[in-house]
Image: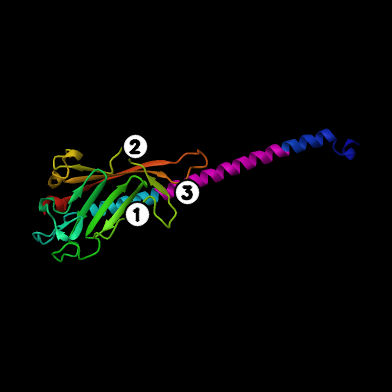
Amino acid sequence: MRSLQGFTLLETVFALFIGLLLLGAIYTSMVSGQKSSLALEGKVMAHQDTRAALEVMALEIGMASYNRHFVPGIWRNPGNCGQPSAYPAYKGIPMATSNSITMEMDIGESGFVGDNPNEIISYVYDVANERITRETNCQGALPFLGDVPGSSRSVRVINHTLNMPVFRYFDGLGNEIAAANLPADIPKIKKIEIILATETEEVAPDTLQRRRMIYSTSVISRNHATN
């Protein structure tokens, strides 16, 4: 006979309370999963951008001083690509600091540097805008990694925040060349280490912090050692 009487008010309120608790738990789980997914997506984009930039930089820096035919007087003035270098002993690395490097190479094998695209390349760490810029053949620097106008920015380059150089230089014995000894010791460079410390542009919704990552690679400058 009791089943014909339905539920009491207390039982109904208790059932509604349990249902609301379950809905709240499901909602919280969904929001947490969505935040984690967005944070992971931002980290993946930052990883892809930085790794791609590092690979291009390593490839181009590894070609520094390429002069297959050993043509004398081939190197250019990095400030004016139409003038011969005032320091021929620097060969295809006319400029090297902890935050910048310029490479020259005769990839067209014409016996002249600068008559083909990408034969004179400069990378500079733009601290103020937290980005790396790239300039080719003295045509003006363009954003390469970091704050790139007209595109969605995914990373900030923060080497300065972590007190890390972007470039480190080593001689043939593996000894690091002090920044104070550059550019005079440019002829001694045999290996170049590239370090990119980055953080995601967007704040992770789950931690309310930007994700930081550090990438590095080393390049043996074989052409610079021989030409």
Q: Residue at x 89, y 35 (%)?
A: 2
Which of marks 2 and 3 precedes in the sequence? 3
Q: What type is the residue that disc 2 sits on?
A: Leu
From the viewer's perspective, is 115 left or right of 6?
left
Q: Provide the secondary structure element on which disc 1 rests.
A: strand
Image quadrant where one finds the N terminus:
top right
Magenta region includes residue 184: no
The numbered disc on residue 143 is: 1
Q: Position of residue 214 (x, y in %)?
A: 35, 41
Image quadrant where one finds the C terminus:
bottom left
Q: What type is the residue that disc 3 sits on?
A: Glu
Residue nearest the viewer, comparing 84 with 186: 84
Question: Could you tell me how far apart the alpha carbons at marks 1 and 2 are, in whole angstroms?
Answer: 21 Å
Question: Could you tell me how far apart the alpha carbons at marks 3 and 2 are, in whole angstroms?
Answer: 24 Å
Q: Position of residue 142 (x, y in %)?
A: 33, 56
Q: Provide the secondary structure element on which disc 2 rests.
A: loop
Which of marks 1 and 3 precedes in the sequence? 3
| Residue 85 to residue 28: above or below | below
Residue 46 can be seen, yes or no:
yes
Q: Residue at x 24, y 56 (%)?
A: 121
Q: Provide the secondary structure element on which disc 3 rests.
A: helix
Q: Main secondary structure of the magenta part?
A: helix
Q: Which residues are magenta?
A: 19-46
Question: Could you tell me how far apart the alpha carbons at marks 3 and 1 are, in whole angstroms?
Answer: 23 Å
From the viewer's perspective, is 143 left or right of 153?
left
Question: Furthest residue to the top?
Answer: 10
